[in-house]
Image (cartoon, grey):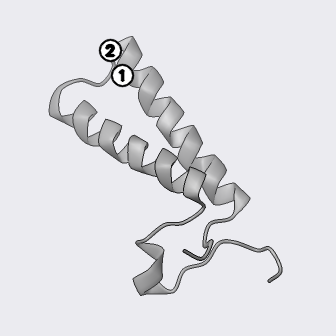
Amino acid sequence: MKKNMGKEDRFLRILFAMIVGVLYYKGVIEGTFAIVLGTLAVVFVLTSFLNFCPLYLPFGINTNKTKK
């Protein structure tokens, strides 16, 4: 797997996951909506730690700005 995520992208994904977690903990989101957002948050955290997003491949997106 080639890294295709930059620092800003990873930061925003983790921030989103933390916000979803807080909203769920506070009871602001619940039910099916909370499950969908929670699943998306888990995927965002996993892809952030891997520095790789499989959905970027078909579209040719690469936010990683490091030199090769």
- Relative image position of residue 35 (x, y in whole percent): 24, 35
Q: Residue at x 40, y 72 (%)?
A: 55
Specify the farthest residue to the top: 26
Placement of the C terminus among the 4 image quadrants: bottom right
Disc 2 packing (10 Å; few <14; some 14–19; many ≥20): few
27 left or right of 12 in image: left
SS at circle 2: loop
- Relative image position of residue 29 (x, y in whole percent): 29, 25
Question: What numbered label is drawn on residue 5?
Answer: none
Q: Amino acid at mark 2?
A: Gly
Q: Along the line of sight, which residue is nearer the eye, 37 or 53?
A: 53
- In this picture, is 65 found above or below 34? below
Specify the farthest residue to the right: 67
Q: Residue at x 32, y 14 (%)?
A: 27
SS at circle 1: helix
- Relative image position of residue 6 (x, y in whole percent): 69, 64
Placement of the N terminus among the 4 image quadrants: bottom right
Disc 1 packing (10 Å; few <14; some 14–19; many ≥20): some
- In this picture, is 11 found above or below 34? below
Q: Along the line of sight, which residue is nearer the eye, 6 or 51?
A: 51
- In this picture, is 5 found above or below 23? below
Q: Residue at x 23, y 23 (%)?
A: 30
Image quarter of residue 64: bottom right
Please name the residue that numbered disc 1 is placed on: 24
Disc tally is 2
- In this picture, is 27 found above or below 13? above
Q: Residue at x 58, y 39 (%)?
A: 15
Q: Amino acid at mark 1?
A: Tyr
Q: Are marks 2 and 1 in contact (CB under 8 Å)?
A: yes
Question: What numbered label is drawn on residue 27?
Answer: 2
